[in-house]
Image (tube, rainbow, N blue to C red):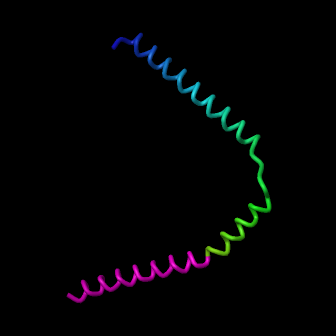
Amino acid sequence: MQLKDRVSDVVRSAKAKAAAVAVIAAAGASSASAATVDVADLVAAIKEYAASTSPIVLIGGAILLVTLAVVAFKWLRSAMR
């Protein structure tokens, strides 16, 4: 492939990427201006999420505790050999 062909391929690729970016930006701008946010729904969703984090933390902590207990048991068994 000659240098001239490579340059034309790079230019063609750059034009295609620029066109794709322009289309994505236009779509994002039109959807952002058309979108409205209901603050009451957002606050309700945040409160619901905040209330559900406690069980998530408890379950994660229990899993971590069991995992650490298994690892410690294996370590103690290997140290006793």
> Residue visible at 54% across and 27% down?
17
- Which corner quadrant of the image does residue 1 belong to? top left
- Whether 72 is among the magenta residues is yes
- Which corner quadrant of the image does residue 20 belong to? top right
> Residue visible at 35% across and 83% down?
72
Q: Identify the main secondary structure in magenta.
A: helix
> Residue visible at 52% across and 23% down?
14
Residue farthest along the bottom direction in this orientation: 80
Q: Is residue 17 left or right of residue 33?
A: left
User: Where residue 35 sits: x, y (%)?
Assistant: 74, 45
Q: Is residue 77 above or below residue 33?
A: below
> How many marks overall?
0
- Which range is magenta? 54-81
Q: Is residue 43 above or below residue 30?
A: below
Q: Is residue 4 above or below residue 47?
A: above
Q: Is residue 55 above or below residue 6?
A: below
Residue farthest along the left direction in this orientation: 81
- Whether 59 is among the magenta residues is yes
> Residue visible at 70% across and 40% down?
31
**Which is more toward the observer, 62 or 55?**
55
Q: Is residue 20 left or right of residue 39?
A: left
**Which is more toward the observer, 26 or 70?**
26
Q: Is residue 45 left or right of residue 20?
A: right
